[in-house]
Image: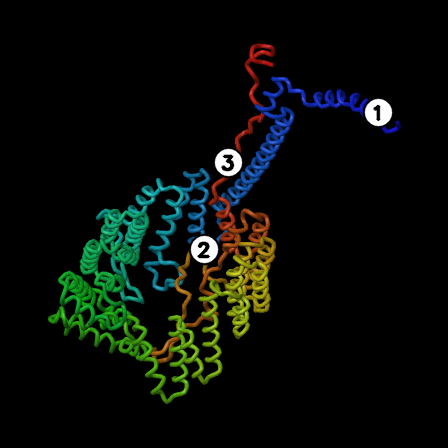
């Protein structure tokens, strides 16, 4: 009975619940109205889309605001920099007026790019006149300073400052130069008395006048630019024009950069140069022709190459023509009106002596006279110069011949000091050629302690120089540096290591540079100390601005503690950093890598100011303002200006439009609206 009631109760409950379940389910499964379904399918939730549009608009506005702020900051920075540049252009503080002229010409090139073309060209033209006046004065001065820049190089540098940012000014500057060079016959006749066409020169006996060299340099450098742009025909025209004045090194450099399919043009230009020198010969121009002879004849540039030249000339009529033209130019030099000056030049005598075999082969009638001139010229020299002229070749030996010559001296010498010098020379040659194992063997045979330490330092320094960028472990390089005895050389090595490590391991780079600073600050205040600290600051500026400014302040303090600064780069020419120390017979030489005098010749590297300009302009300006030397202060400020003005200004961003969709042109409630 109970069971029957239970079954009946369950049946009744199911009957009651089933309609409710069906209604409940249908309530949640009713199809959506057609309009709502289409609206979500087309664009999703309208509120969500609106929020996303507002967010995007907000982000774009914030980005634009940041960009406008950066552009405004840069605009204000450029205005500050132009104010500094204007002050330097108006300043007359520099005691060296030539340095002032060169600095102002370079500054004019900077402000020209900022829209001050007329003023820039005016400044450059004035600087050019001052530079040319100096050139003429220096040309006639008997005790001119050879450390200062060559006048023609100075003129070219100032002229190029005008054309860097404004090529349209080139014609104006060239017209100025043409007037200064006294292009017409009347002006040329007036200029001859003050500046002869060929003047004395200690190195080569004679050299072309400043006017001729300046004109030739401008044209030959223009030819190099044309070659770089791939316009060989235009380059050849400029080179031919340059020969109307004289033959200069850039002319030969341009010939060497011409492709092999342009060899006929190279040969014709060289023949034209030979005729130019023959008509108005100078010792310097003969040396320039000698520099290019191996390129044109495709022969060895080493000493003893005359035999190779003769063999090729006997088989090739064109090579023979080139050799004969070269010998005719030498003949015109040694028997011309300047023969007395040329005969006093050891370098010119050695060069002519080296070509005697060619005279015997191709100019047998002239050969006895040239040989007699060489003998008399050598006899008139002082004994040390006689030894150089008689025993030192005018061109370097090949590696094999040089090694054999030095080894013979080392093995046959009974003098311990001479034997040590020979092994040092042998080691130095091996180091220069990258044969470090053989260099180490030669050093081990040196008995003198000081010389042995010097050569060991040289070997280790060069090993570091050539391997640091490819080293798998900086720790090995660091251990090699620790073995260097010379503190300045060790500091230079740490600087090189720091520069290399900064690209991969900045922590290790920082440790290396800190070692360099520690070694540098222990040195006495001197150009050496200042150079090292400036170099460290320049490396730091690549990856750590705070330490760059800190090290720059150390360098400024060092610069202010001594007055014996190297020459300014504006008025001096810095060439090779390599010094070769010779014995008293001038037979054995070794490269010196730890030369204290080098720091007195090399201009300071102030590039750290340029690097700091856009990141910490105030820090760089403060450091520049605290320099005691007016020359260094002006150069540092120039670097700051260049660091800003040589970078294209950032354009202000356009106004950001609203991200809201455009309003509908239809009225609410019209057809199509829902």
Left or right: 627 as drawn, with respect to 103 = right
Q: From this viewpoint, is residue 180 visible? A: no
Looking at the rendering, which quadrant does residue 116 occupy?
top left
Q: Position of residue 121 (x, y in %)?
A: 39, 42
Looking at the rendering, which quadrant does residue 193 occupy?
bottom left
Q: Residue furthest front?
A: 1
Q: Which residue is mark 2?
A: 96
Q: Quadrant of the C terminus?
A: top right
Q: Residue furthest right?
A: 2
Left or right: 644 as drawn, with respect to 295 = right
Residue shown at the point (75%, 23%) measured from the top left? 21
* Secondary structure of residue under mark 3: loop
Q: Which residue is mark 1?
A: 9
Residue shown at the point (31%, 75%) measured from the top left? 400
Q: Which residue is mark 3?
A: 651
Q: Position of residue 373 (x, y in %)?
A: 19, 73
Residues packed near mark 1 inside 10 Å, few (<14), some (14 to 19) or many (20 plus): few
Instruction: Say if 180 sits above or below 337 in the image.
Output: above
Alpha carbons under labels 3 and 1: distance apart: 86 Å
Q: Position of residue 298 (x, y in %)?
A: 23, 63
Residue shown at the point (50%, 61%) measured from the top left? 500
Q: Position of residue 257 (x, y in %)?
A: 29, 56
* Secondary structure of residue under mark 2: loop
Residues packed near mark 2 inside 10 Å, few (<14), some (14 to 19) or many (20 plus): few
Alpha carbons under labels 3 and 2: distance apart: 40 Å
Which numbered disc flags the more N-terminal residue, 3 or 2?
A: 2
């Amino acid at each position: 009975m109970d069971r029957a009631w239970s079954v009946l109760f369950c049946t009744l409950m199911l009957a009651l619940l089933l309609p409710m379940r069906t209604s409940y389910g249908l309530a949640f499964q009713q199809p959506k109205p057609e309009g709502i379904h289409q609206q979500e399918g087309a664009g999703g939730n309208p509120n969500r889309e609106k929020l996303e549009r507002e967010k995007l608009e907000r982000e774009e506005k914030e980005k634009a605001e940041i960009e406008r702020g950066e552009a405004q900051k840069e605009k204000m920075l450029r205005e500050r920099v132009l104010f500094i540049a204007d002050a330097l252009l108006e300043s007359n503080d520099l005691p060296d007026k030539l340095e002032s002229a060169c600095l102002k010409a370079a500054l004019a090139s900077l402000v020209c790019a900022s829209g001050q073309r007329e003023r820039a060209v005016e400044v450059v033209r004035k600087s050019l006149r001052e530079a040319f006046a100096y050139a003429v004065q220096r040309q006639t001065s008997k005790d001119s300073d050879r450390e200062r820049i060559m006048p023609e190089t100075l003129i070219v540098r100032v002229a190029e400052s005008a054309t860097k940012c404004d090529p349209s000014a080139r014609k104006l500057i060239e017209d100025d130069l043409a007037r200064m060079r006294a292009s017409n016959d009347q002006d040329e006749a007036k200029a001859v008395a003050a500046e002869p066409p060929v003047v004395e020169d200690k190195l080569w006996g004679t050299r072309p006048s400043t006017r001729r060299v300046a004109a030739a340099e401008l044209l030959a450098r223009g030819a190099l630019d044309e070659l770089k742009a791939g316009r060989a025909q235009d380059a050849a025209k400029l080179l031919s024009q340059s020969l109307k004045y004289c033959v200069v090194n850039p002319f030969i450099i341009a010939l060497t950069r011409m492709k092999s399919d342009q060899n006929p043009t190279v040969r014709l230009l060289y023949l034209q140069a030979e005729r130019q020198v023959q008509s108005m010969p100078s010792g310097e121009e003969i040396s320039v022709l000698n520099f290019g002879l191996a390129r044109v004849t495709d022969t060895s540039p080493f000493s003893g190459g005359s035999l190779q030249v003769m063999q090729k000339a006997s088989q090739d009529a064109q090579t023979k023509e080139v050799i004969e033209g070269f010998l005719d130019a030498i003949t015109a030099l040694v028997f011309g009106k300047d023969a007395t000056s040329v005969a006093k030049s050891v370098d010119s005598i050695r060069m002519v002596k080296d070509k005697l075999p060619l005279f015997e082969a191709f100019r047998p009638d002239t050969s006895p006279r040239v040989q007699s001139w060489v003998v008399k010229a050598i006899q008139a020299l002082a004994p040390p110069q006689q030894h150089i002229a008689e025993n030192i070749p005018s061109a370097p030996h090949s590696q094999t011949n040089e090694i054999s010559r030095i080894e013979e001296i080392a093995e046959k010498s009974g003098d311990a000091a001479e034997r040590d010098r020979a092994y040092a020379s042998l080691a130095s040659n091996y180091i220069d050629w990258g044969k470090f194992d053989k260099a180490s063997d030669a050093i081990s045979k040196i008995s003198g302690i000081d010389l042995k330490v010097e050569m060991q330092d040289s070997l280790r320094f060069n090993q570091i120089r050539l391997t640091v960028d490819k080293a798998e472990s900086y720790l090995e390089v660091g251990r090699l540096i620790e073995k260097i005895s010379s503190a300045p050389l060790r500091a230079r090595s740490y600087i090189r290591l720091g520069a290399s490590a900064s690209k991969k391991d900045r922590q290790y780079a920082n440790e290396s540079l800190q070692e360099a600073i520690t070694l540098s600050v222990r040195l006495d205040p001197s150009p050496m100390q200042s150079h090292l600290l400036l170099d460290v600051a320049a490396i730091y500026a690549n990856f750590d601005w705070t330490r760059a400014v800190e090290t720059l302040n150390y360098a400024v303090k060092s610069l202010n503690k001594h007055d014996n600064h190297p020459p300014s780069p504006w008025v001096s020419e810095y060439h090779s950093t390599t010094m070769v120390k010779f014995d008293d017979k001038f037979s054995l030489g070794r490269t010196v890598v730890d030369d204290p005098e080098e720091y007195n010749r090399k201009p300071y590297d102030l590039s750290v100011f340029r690097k700091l300009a856009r990141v910490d302009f105030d820090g760089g300006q403060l450091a520049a303002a605290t320099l005691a030397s007016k020359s260094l202060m002006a150069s540092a400020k120039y670097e700051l200006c260049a660091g800003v003005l040589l970078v294209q200004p950032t354009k202000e961003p356009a106004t950001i439009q609203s991200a809201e969709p455009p309003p509908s042109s239809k009225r609410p409630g019209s057809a199509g609206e829902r």
